[in-house]
Amino acid sequence: MDTLIAQLQRQFRDYTISLYHQGFLDDQFTELKKLQDECSPDFVAEVVTLFFEDCEKLISNMARALDQTGNVDFKLVGSSVHQLKGSSSSVGAKRVKGLCITLKECCDTQNYEGCVRCLQQVDIEYKTLKAKLQDLFNLEQQIVQAGGRIPQVDI
Amino acid sequence: MARDGGVSCLRRSEMMSVGGIGGIESAPLDLDEVHVLAVDDSLVDRIVIERLLRITSCKVTAVDSGWRALEFLGLDNEKASAEFDRLKVDLIITDYCMPGMTGYELLKKIKESSNFREVPVVIMSSENVLTRIDRCLEEGAQDFLLKPVKLADVKRLRSHLTKDVKLSNGNKRKLPEDSNSVNSSLPPPSPPLTISPESSPPLTVSTESSDSSPPLSPVEIFSTSPLSSPIDDEDDDVLTSSSEESPIRRQKMRSPGLD
């Protein structure tokens, strides 16, 4: 019979693997984990928190720009999505990054409908990732609280 | 995690007054630590690069724009820098695409300055555009890193820096290899150049042998290097990064770099 710790560790491992396999995360997220240690035990959580704040702000900027019907500043949208693409790339948010690329293309061709649709998807996607990572961090916390250690997951 | 820009620069005059010793040959303990100036307008990227550098034993000052970088280096005004306290900056690593002043423009300004032109400058970019890379390397950039930057990239840069025996006005010192020690001995006033060849060099290194020649000839340790990462096809759009005014300025800067 599995101990609680073993169960939690297995859940954590499975969940982590699924996030990579479903394309939510890529190897840059793995790189971030390498930067976490006893001196910086919450580094990943802190960085992704900043990333999600970035998402919120930049998406809001873009939505506002797209709202100016007849006078949309596509350059501003393009600049915002460039920034968002950059930070999503830096944290390994693979799906968000992919959508940013699509959004950038819509922006470059001044495809208003495409931009609006894409932006909505970016919004959904970052919120989905945020919830999933929150679940992952919660699992980590449960493991630690149960007295176990967080397993290293090789993707 | 340092969100305040982590100003950890060492001004030579401050070091001397603290140590109570005069003369340029007295080297306070911290001179052997590698100090990197990181420039990136993205907060997320700044935090990551700062961590990457710290974990490889560098002291880091992170700023959010080219202008802040010039301000930090004392290059933001026209007055002669003869009496300017020499900052100890061993490496400048900057993003290419930044509003206001691009990394390329910053690179040019650094290379135009007498105090800092010998400091290696590394450019980071998410776009793998060969013309951009060439332009930067031609302008004197030591390396070009494709974002997202990985630990291996920074370790490679770091390993070059520990062997850097470049002598220039503001940066006289000889570093032991990979040393974190703060108790290293003081270097002599004019240290002879010794260059230890890299054991497994990822890049070709051009070196000059110097045995009895005067120690003040600069030595190129870095060479122009190939890309650090394989070609990323999905990122080959060319982003215009001219110095025209940026439509976006981040409203909230949590890590303004310098106050």
Image (cartoon, rainbow, N blue to C red):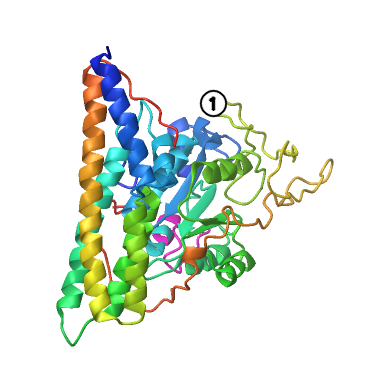
Seen in the picture, residue A120 relative to B148 is either above or below; the reply is below
Q: Position of residue B7 (x, y in %)?
A: 37, 45
Q: Is residue B107 magenta?
A: no
Q: Return the x and y of residue B6 as percentages of the image width and height.
A: 35, 43
Q: Which residue is mark 1?
A: B181
Is residue A146 rendered to the left or right of residue B30?
left
Residue toward you, B45 or A69: A69
From the top left corner, tell me how far across and down residue A71 is, in percent: 19, 86
Which amino acid type corresponds to the residue marked 1 in the rendered image?
A: Ser
Answer above or below: position of B72 versus A113.
above
Q: Mainly helix, strand or loop, the magenta region? A: loop
Q: Is residue B188 above or below residue A66?
A: above
- What percent of the width, then of the height, locates residue A5? 27, 17
Secondary structure category for the residue under label 1: loop
Which range of residues does the magenta coloring cover? B70-82
Decide whether residue B72 is among the magenta residues: yes
Along the viewing direction, whichever of B137 and A144 lies nearer the viewer: A144
Residue B38, compared with residue B137, is above or below; it is above
| Residue at image location 33% in from the left, 24% down from the top | A150
Instruction: Find residue A149 and report its image quarter.
Output: top left
- Res A20 quadrant in image: top left
